[in-house]
Structure formats: C-alpha cells, structure tokens
Image: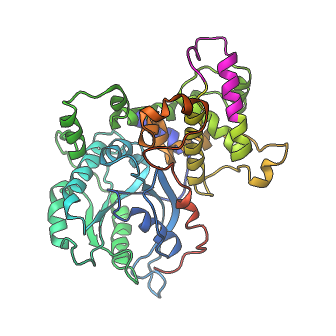
Amino acid sequence: MTSTLLNLFQRFYPSDIQRVVIAGLSYGGKTTLLYLLKTGDVVTTIPSLGFNVEVVEAPTSSSGSSGSKNPLKMEAWDVGTGCAGSSMIIRMLRFYMPSAKALIWVVDSADKERLTESVETLDGVLADIDCEPDTADRHIPVLILANKSDQSNATPLDKVRLSFSRVLSGRISAIYATSLTANPPTGLPEAFDWLSLAIDIAKTAKKGPRGQLPVIVTSQEKSAAAQSGSKLSPVASQRDPSVLAKRLGEWLQRIESDSPPDEFMQQFKEYRLPSWDHYTHIRLAYLILIAHGRQKGKDILFEGLSNYISNNNTTQTNARTFHVTMTYFWLQVVHFGIRNVPENLAPPHASTAQEASPSQLPYPSSADFFKFLLINPHLVDGSLWSDYYSKETIMSPEAKGSMVLPDKKSLPSLVGREAVSGFGVAKPV
C-alpha cells in the first residue's frame, strides 16, 4: 500500500524542498523546536493535534557568518501526539517517512521516567519503516535531540546515548544535547551541521541485510492489552493504532477514485452520494467550510445533512437521525484542521467578510483534501469524540437535539497556529 501512497504523495503534494519529520513523545519540545526554527523565538505551545508543517531554515555553525555553510532549508513535519500516544506515532509514520529525508526524534532529558518509553517508541517506528518496501533498502538519518539538557535533573548525554545504542545500531544517527528554551538556545547549529552532512551521505549509502526484524509492541500497547485481557471492545478495536493507520491509507487512496469536488457536492444536493460514511462526512465539512467559511458553512452543513437524512431514498440513512452535538463536534474538529494547514499549503478559503457575500469561493481540489488529511490524520478516527464526551452525555436526548458542551475536556483550540502568526520573519537562532 505504501508504494501507491508514495506515488499519490508525490503527485498530490510535490515539493522541491526536502522533507524532515519531527517526532517523539509528548511534552518533549517538538513544536517548540519547529517554531523556534520558523520564527527565531520560543513560542508557548500546547499539545498538538495533527501535524504542524512549516518551511524552516535550521541554523548551522557557519550560517550567518563568513563561513561557507548555509542554513539547512527543509519542510518540517511536527507530529502532534495530542490525543494519540506513542502507539499512534508508530503506526502513522509509515505513510510519511517514505517521502522524508530524515527523522528528528526529540527526547525530554529531564523526564527520566519516560526515557525507556521513548526508546521503545523509536524502536517501533524504525522497525515499522524497515518493513516498508519504499524505505527498507535506504538509510533515513536519525537525529536525536536530548532536549532540556540544561535542567538540573536532566539525564546525562552519555546515558541517553547508551539507552538508544541498540535501536540506532547500523543506522546513520547521532545524538546531541540541546536546550531550546535557554537564552540563547544551545546545541542546534552542531546538530544541524551533522544532519546536513548525514542527508548527503544517505543519498548514496545503502543498507546492508538486517535479517528478520522483530515485531515491536510499545509499553502503552502492552499495558492496554493486559488491562483488557487482550480482548478489545468494539470502540477500542476501531481505535487501535493499526486499524486507524490502515484506514488513513484507504482514505488517501480513495481520494483518487472519488468524485471531483463539484460533482461530489452536486450529488450531496441531489441526495445521491455513492456512500454515507465517516469519510463522506469529513469531506463534506471540509469542502463546505473552505468555500463558505465557518458561520455560513455551519448553517449550510447542518441544513444539508438534515435534508439528506430526510430525503435519501436508499438504505444509506436508515435508522439515522440528525445529531446536533455530534455534527457540531466534527465541524469544530474539521475547522481546527483547516486552520492548522499552513498558508503556503492551504487553498483559498472564505474570510469573515466573504461570508456575508452571496458568492462563494471554488471548492478545494482533491489534491487539497489529500494534503488536509495528511496534516490531520486524526480525522480518520470516527470515535475521536470519546476523548471529549462520555457516552452518556453524547448519546443523551439533549445532545441529539441541541448543542451540549464536552464533559471530559474542552474542544480543540485554535491557539496553536495563531500564537505564532504575529512573530514575523525569523531571527538568527
């Protein structure tokens, strides 16, 4: 499947800039690193949902001086682990690494309790990548940043290197100590000196035979299996990382054969869509919100879904009723995802002023939807609502008939990207 997806990736999302994936456990400093490279400032961040994608120029030891080296320009993909956890990282990265030139793994040196989990998770990521035909025979450099190394309780760099030594054996890899929030930040020029050289070396270096790779199960997955007696509930099984990863691949492939946007919307208006499933609902919300904006789009989507359920003459919508809270939840999450797409990758979308106009913007292309899903893979999880609502609340008559606020945690906030929009051009790091 990944070979097909790589072809789709290159077709729908071509780029002349080398891609690098930034990953690691939550609270390690991944998003801090991304926006430090982007803006030159330390930005207060929150746990990310989906990917943050930016074109950045990473400092090298001679950049900005009379030396011959230039900043390392790259398209950086920061993997948000907001609701997912380490097992989700492993299963999803198989779709992103074939087009990447390197992996930057960020470790919280001050979090000694999770060092082993970080090692196990990276082990799982690399084992999964090695099993894919598009990456099995080529080196992907791995740069580990032991972040927060300036803190008094930080794990010594030698111990971090020892902990990762087995996982990195036979790979083009290096570990550097960094402190991203120090004034000034430390360790980055030396680390990106190495990464620039490693990417060049990896272009011609070939992996030797590695034998049979082990199946990696993270401590998080082991714990979940033990608690459930290795028997997952129907909801849990649908949220299993391997199931969601497979579904993401199916959705990305489905885009190529799906109806073009204008035809898709006409099918919606005429109550004759080829399917009525989670993918269809996400695509409808995406197309309508892009073309009409948040407020007008909400009204169009609510009315359209209600009419479709009432007027469709097939078995698609049998026994289904319009659910206000559930619809509002997915509208909010899709809108969050739209705002999470960086401006250089996003299609034109309706502004607040344009919402008042009777005209609308063109619907975004299939390629735009492909990029949207790549940046927001969590949208394939049809049970994402359960992170925010208890079943009792979401299935109550009140929630079905009117908007009810979450009882577990607040809905995703738009703070992330807007928090950095006012920083302007990047300053030297």
Q: Which x, y percent locates residue 391?
A: 42, 33
- For the image, the number of numbered tags is 0
Q: Which x, y percent locates residue 266?
A: 74, 26
Q: Which x, y percent locates residue 159?
A: 15, 68
Q: Is residue 309 magenta?
A: yes
Closer to the camera in the image, 73 or 327: 327
Residue drawn at x 58%, y 22% as measured from the top left: 276
Q: Is residue 71 visible?
A: yes
Q: How did the renderer colour the structure?
A: rainbow
Q: Magenta residues?
A: 301-321
Considering the image in quadrants, where does the N terminus appear?
A: top left
Q: Is residue 216 visible?
A: no
Residue drawn at x 33%, y 72% as measured from the top left: 191
Above or below 296: residue 306:
above
Q: Is residue 318 magenta?
A: yes
Q: Which x, y percent locates residue 106?
A: 32, 63
| Residue furthest to the top | 314
Above or below 53: residue 278:
above
Considering the image in quadrants, where does the C terminus appear?
A: bottom left
| Residue furthest to the front | 398
Residue drawn at x 77%, y 44% as measured from the top left: 361
Q: Is residue 353 left or right of residue 413?
A: right
Above or below 286: residue 57:
below
Residue drawn at x 54%, y 57% as measured from the top left: 16
| Residue furthest to the bottom | 66
Q: Is residue 90 left or right of residue 316?
A: left
Which quadrant of the structure image shows residue 328? Answer: top right
Q: Is residue 70 left or right of residue 193?
A: right
Closer to the camera in the image, 147 or 123: 147
